[in-house]
Image (spheres, rainbow, N blue to C red):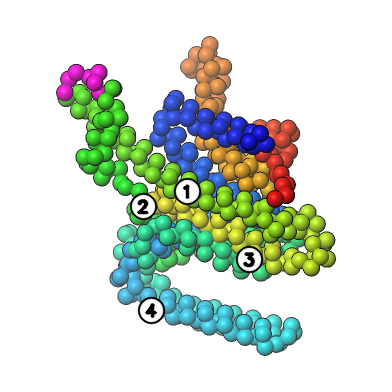
Amino acid sequence: MRKNLNVIAAYSIMMGLIILVGVFQSWNIALSIFNLCLISAVMTMGANIQWGYAGLINFGIMGYTALGGLAAVLISVDPVQDAWKAGGFDILTSLLIIVVMIMAIRFVLKKYEKSKIRTYSIAAIIIAGIVIIRITAEPGIEAIEAVEPAKTGFLGGLGLPIVFSWIVGALFAGGLAFVVGKVALGLRADYLAIATLLISEIVIAIIKHEDWLTRGVKNVIGLKRPAPYEVDLQTTDWFINLVEKFNSGKLALISDFADRQAALNQLVIEGSSIFVKLCYSGLFLVVVIILLILTQKALYSPWGRMMRAIRDNEEAANAMGKNVVKQHLLIFILGSAIVGIAGAMLVTQDGLFTPGSYRPMRYTFLIWVMVIVGGSGNNFGAILGGFAVWFLWIEAAPIALFLINFFTTGMAETNALKVHLIESVPYFRFLMMGIGLLLIMRYRPKGILPEKIEIK
């Protein structure tokens, strides 16, 4: 208990700050921050597995997050029957051609030793396959995108509960990580970072422009959700009675029946939003706890000790007979799969898929800041970093506005300096993030909760 005192203290402070937001702003805002902190925590665990366990730099987190979001669309949206009739056969034919290409390449790789013949054969298969796929798929894609483009214009999905997409998102991200890992993991660390960033940009470009698959920048809205809808709760007797009972003291102070009913209606509206967010909080918290247990067991297992040995001295581990390349590929896949889960969770909460919103600042570099601030190599630190950085990212503007008003109390409302500072409030988050990161790097260079090596 004593050795975990710093962890308990750090998380207590973090939860206290979120509670203060609920008290002084609103519980809706506090729960929104809490839910996004949980999703960010899942992303940081994925990045921490790659960097903290194995020392792999992955700047492609954005791409794996987007694949998780894509999984939410392909799993939960109902299939568009007219689109399937218009061009579904062409798309399936193209997928079959891709499978044949992969099998042909595998055959060539196994049949021939490394030589110019093998290289030219693989290049010929890829070029011929691309040409055939383009000829086959293009008419189908045009037909699909022409089916009510304002409403659909894509194939849709499987119409399954969206929670299944969390698993599929992990599979999508893990599959891409396998391909990327096979190609890029042999690169030097700085080249690996550049390669993963560029590959993630390619993924985003494909998702944004392939309307037949994702509707592109037209977005997909109204996705199925695992929580009840607010409008349904507002007309449900048990929920209305629950809100009335919970606020009985407040309602008893209102003597007029009409006013009391109006107040109850307002409380029901506010309560429905809070209830839905609490449902998401429960789901996301379960995911975070499960992943934390698994990653902690992995960290202190013989496998985890081996990964840290590879991270600290790759040459020595290789000399001891450890397959460094294989282990790097495995951990790259595992970390990316966890990020894919977070991407699906994010779209599940938002209820919409917007490919244009995936930007490196939010979905790559901010996640890296979370891992660095929290403490790489420590799962509790990575999660805390997700909470702390996201909380500061959201609350930077309200904090800045409060401080500006406090320090300019004696100035007139029309004062040029005061007006300029208030208009600049949205940019204070970058200033506060920079100052916070500098302070952490100066006084806690290993993070708030640095890595602790324990022998178990």
- Residue type highlighted by circle 4: Phe
**Compared with residue 257, is residue 41 higher up or lower down, i.e. above or below?**
below
For residue 373, the mark is none
Dot 1 or dot 3, earlier in sequence? 3
Tag in front: 3 or 2: 2
Decide if residue 78 is on the left or right side of residue 265: right
Packing grade of label 1 (10 A; few <14, some 14-19, many >=20) is: few
Q: Secondary structure at mark 1?
A: helix
Q: Nearer the viewer, mark 1 or mark 4?
A: 1
Labels 2, 1: front one: 1
> Which residue is disc 4 drawn over?
89
Q: Residue at x 70, y 41 (%)?
A: 450
Marks 3, 4: nearer the viewer: 3
Numbered tag placed on residue 286 in the rendering:
1
Mark 1–mark 4 Cα distance, whole angstroms, equals 40 Å
State how far apart marks 2 and 4 are (Cα): 30 Å
Residue shown at 24% from the left, 40% from the top: 238
Label 2 crowd bin: few (<14), some (14–19), many (20+), radius 10 Å:
some
Q: Residue under label 3, please give it.
A: 180
- 10 Å neighbourhood of mark 4: few (<14), some, or many (≥20)? some
Q: Secondary structure at mark 3?
A: helix
Say which mark, if any, is on residue 225: 2
Q: Earlier in the sequence, mark 2 or mark 4?
A: 4
Labels 3 & 4 near each other (Cβ < 8 A): no
Q: Nearer the viewer, mark 1 or mark 3?
A: 1
| Highlighted magenta segment, given as a residue range | 251-257
Q: Is residue 435 visible?
A: yes
SS at badge 4: helix
Whole-angstrom CA distance, mark 3 to mark 2, is 32 Å
Which badge, 1 or 4, is on the more N-terminal residue? 4
